[in-house]
Every structure is written in structure tokens, then in C-alpha cells.
Amino acid sequence: MNSTRAKPCPLLHLDNVTIRFGGLTAVSSVSASLGDNELTGLIGPNGAGKTTVFNMITGVYAPTEGAIHFQNKSVTGLKPFAITERGIARTFQNIRLFSSLSVFDNVRVAFHLHVTQNTAHSLTRGPKFRAEERDITDQTRALLDIFQLTRVQDEPAKSLPYGDQRRLEIVRALATRPKLLLLDEPAAGMNPAEKVELMKLIRFIREKFQLSILLVEHDMKVVMGICERIHVLEYGRKIAEGTPAEIRQHPAVVAAYLGKEITH
Amino acid sequence: MLPRSQIVLLISLITAGIISASSSRIDDYILDVILGIGINIILAVSLNLINGFTGQFSLGHAGFMAVGAYAAGTLTTGPGKVWFDASGASPALLFPFVLFAGGLTAAVVGLAVGAPSLRLKGDYLAIVTLGFGEIIKVILQNIEWLGGSRGMVGIPSYTSFFWCFGAAAVTIYAAWALVNSTLGRGFLAVADDEIAAEAMGLNTTRYKIIAFVTGAFFAGIAGGLYAHLKGYISPAGFDFNKSIEIVVMVILGGMGRHVGVVIAVVLLTVLSEKLRDFGDKRMIVYSALLILLMLTRPQGLFTWKPARKAITG
Ligand SMILES: Nc1ncnc2c1ncn2[C@@H]1O[C@H](COP(=O)(O)OP(=O)(O)OP(=O)(O)O)[C@@H](O)[C@H]1O
Ligand SMILES: [Mg+2]
């Protein structure tokens, strides 16, 4: 096991991150590093603290102790929007789309990070403003096209089937042009065929958009199938890190999942 | 070539000018009601930006109207009159600047009220704006050079059909233009899901403040128009009831719909004229109407579109 291996220049680095909610230590002194263009898994039993780790990386919660660095700059304690600006995007375990907005606008909203217009430009609507609006409309269209959501682009997001909503959430996150994408249980509620599609999609996204992905997922087939490295949490502590093959045989992981199938 | 929205605005302004030129032939009472509609359109459309599109809940719009009314009144009637007269320009020409000054003052007050409370999560805005509406009344009652609780009298009637509906057209245009832009999609996102909006990199506090201050600005303009329509303003005229009246118009119009809100304003302003005989009981009818509406059509009376269509440019 090389769980203490330090990469020379990691994209994301968690340094002894701890968070306590009142008396409960949800995440305890977790360290981890992610490099560029990596596909990493974060697994662990229910309540292990996976979503909480996401919430700390994305600024929803500030860690009680420890530090988080992204591209060698501290992002500890920054607000969520500021962290997204720096290049970390996420999806939510319980889908959080803009449910009353159209599929199209759900994605187009995210392009605000790449425009130069301000309030005055919205009012005067000059040629530059209109060109920019056309531009993000085109880019939204292109993105929806890639993920086969064009057909439903005018539907309110809430009217989509579950699987499409999960996919739309990923597309919306991609529109912020992240360097790191956090996916929280994207396969939840999907049937086996959809899960296979999702695995292809995740690999495709990594190649096409040249980003790193951190994946929280309970379905071991999915995690073991696509991740290069896996970190394992139990009761808020990191108990293992390694390749899928290493993790499958790791005694602590086997014990944590005792009675459950982790070898696929 | 101007964008179509600006051509519509231009045509509206020209139409308002033409109607204004012949407005002396309109019966005085009718004209008064019509101008009242124009002012209420400005109030409701601007509140819609805050309560409808951005999903916040302000209960203090009458307070910002009061700030605008008193600021404008100060310039034409109060101590500012000296400066107003000294400029030598014709009052009709100066009036838009007076209105603008009223709007600007209201916007500054809006920033002072909104910035601290919009930073907080939860429904603090409703409580803070409710308090603001009452506080502004008390403050005005105690400023002697603004007339105290007697109010400000002898305000010249500069509010013509043109200025009233010109300002209404500009307000509708501004609200429409803001909403149909990258900025406005931010408003809608904040209203829909604040946590998701933050995760998309939207500084939600900033978006809320922009909507709130813009709303306050136009409420201030409406206040200036109101003062120069009635010729008399008093702190009591901008009370909680007035704020609620505007909120009802926005809800009835279907929060976040431009056209619905304008229709609601026309209906409610006419209705409230008809209900004048009831005197104070008017508010009971209003409240009953609001409750009935929330129970039967929570999406508003005039909501027909299932989802917003994508608009470009
Ligand atoms: N805001 C909070 N306040 C108090 N406790 C919290 C909070 N957020 C998370 N927790 C607790 O932290 C622990 C870890 O929760 P978390 O949601 O991170 O688990 P998880 O690994 O994502 O689980 P699951 O697989 O079920 O999604 C749980 O005991 C949870 O109750
Ligand atoms: Mg979770």
C-alpha cells in the first residue's frame, strides 16, 4: 500500500481534513491527493462521510481542521461560488436541478462564468452583448447535443425521467468548465443498462473535457470498472487507498464491507 | 439596427407622448386613475424583479416609494427648490432628473437595507423590509423640514401622462432586459435553488442585491411620480397596506411574469377604485382575495406558459 504517496503537483490536496458537527466527527483527519486527468473513486458504507468530503471541497462546509488546496492554492473556507469559479464543479446526491427552468436554461445559466457582460450591458443590449448571448446559446446547444438532450431542451428540468436528470446535472456542471468534477452517486436509481451507459459517459467526459473526476458511488461494478484509484472511508476515517485490485483485497476494506459483495 | 425590444420601447415612448399631448381632453378623474395605474405598474413590475424572478420576499416596497417621493419632493418643493429655481431650466425638462434623483436615493437606501439582510440565509428580508417600512415612516414623521407628520404640501403637478407611462415603459423594458440576459438567468436560478446556484458559481448574494437595489430604484421613481401627481405626500400614505397592495399585484399576476403583473395591476387598481366606498374595509377585501388566490391558483391568475422558453439576444 502506498497510501502516503505524495504526488509532486496534485490538482487537489486534502491535508488532514476534519469536520465536526456538534459532538459528531463526520470526517476525521482525511488526507488525499488527486492529479490532473485522473478518475478517482471515493467509497465507503452509508454515513461514512463521502458527501461531507464533497461538501468541504466545494465550500458548503468549512473544515473544522485541516486544509484543502486546489492547483496549489488554498481554497479552505472559500464560499461555494468562489470554489466553482476556480474550477471545481459537482453534482448532488439528491439531484438539485433548477427544476422550474428549462433543460436549456439549466445549462445556459452555468455559462455566466465565461461572459464579460455586466448589468449595464443587459440594459443597453449592444452588438457585443448580443454576440455573447448568441455565443453561450450556441455552446449550450452544442453541449446538449453531445449528451443527447436537445430533444427535451425546452422541457422544464423537473419533467425529465430520473436518468436524464442525473445526466443533465452532469452537463450543467460541465458548462462551468471545471478542471475537477465531483459526482455524488450518479448511478443511484439507474437500471443496469443505464449504468453501463453512465460508465461510458464518465470515461468519455474525462477524455473529451480533459478533467479529473472524483466519483462517489455505491455500485462497486461502476467504481471498480472505471476508477484508477480508490479511496475508502469508514466512520469518517480513511481506511485505504489504492488501485481497484488492491482495494478488493485490502483487509480493512473487506472488513468494512463484511457480508457485502465488493468483488465484481 | 436596434434590437426589437428597444424599438418596442421607443414606440411606447412616442405613443405615450402623443397621448400625453391630448390628455387635457381626458376627464380629470379618469386621468387620475390612469396615472395611478401607471405608477402601480412601475411598483409591481419592479417588485416582481425581487419577489417574482429572484424569489426573495420584500415587504417594504412602499418604504422605497416614500424615499423616492420625499427626495423628489425635496427638490421641487422642499429646501432643494432654491437650487431647482436657480438652474433656470424649465421644470418640465428638470422633472426627469428629479425623478432620477428620487430613484437613486431609494436605491442607496435599498443597498443599505438589502446588503446586510440578503447576506443571511433564510427569510430575514421579509422581517427587515417590514421593519424598514415602519422605520422610514417614523423617521419622516420626525423630520420637520420635510413637513413632519403633516407631510409635504404644494408639490407642483409635473406628472404628465408622458412621464408616467414613459417611466412605466422604461421599467418594463429594464425588467425584461435584465431577466433576459445572463444576469437574469442568475436571478431565476437563485429563485429556483440557491444551493445549486452557488454550486454553479453564482454569487447568490450579489444577484439578490442587484435585483433588490434595482427594484428599490424604480420604486423611488414611482414615488416621485406619485408626489407630483397628488401634490401632497405624508408618511402615513406609504404604510404597510401600500406594500401589501403591491405584493398582492405581483402574486396575482403570477410571480415572475411581466404581462400577468401588468394585467393584475390594471384590474386591481380599477377594483380598488370601485371599492373606495368601503373605506378602510378595502384591505379586508384585499386580504380575502389574496387568501382565496393562494388556495385556488398559487401560480397566479394569468399563468399559462408551462415553462420559460429560451430567448436569445
Ligand atoms: N450538516 C450536518 N449536520 C450534522 N451531521 C451531519 C451533517 N452532514 C452530515 N452529517 C453526518 O455526517 C455523517 C456522514 O454523512 P455523509 O452524508 O457524508 O455520508 P455519506 O458517506 O455520503 O453517506 P451515504 O452513502 O449514505 O450518502 C453522517 O453521520 C451524517 O449524519
Ligand atoms: Mg452521501
Image: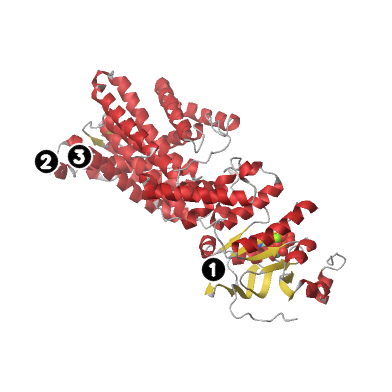
Give the Cα separation between the discs numbered 3 and 2. Answer: 10 Å
The location of residue B245, given as percent across then percent down, is 44, 33
Residue type at tag 3? Leu
- Looking at the image, residue B22 lies above or below residue B72: above
The answer to whether one can see residue B123 in this image is no
- Tell whether label 2 touches label 1 (CB within 8 Å): no
How dense is the environment of label 3, judged by Cα within 10 Å: few (below 14), some, or many (20 and up)?
A: some
Q: Is residue A181 above or below residue B82?
A: below
Q: Label 2: few (<14), some or many (≥20) within 10 Å?
A: few
| Chain hosting mark 1 | A
Residue beneath disc 2: B88
Image quadrant assignment for residue B17 = top left
Write the residue at 49% across / 36% down. Answer: B257
What kind of residue is marked 1? Gly
- Whole-percent x and y of residue B256? 49, 38
Residue denoted by label 1:
A77
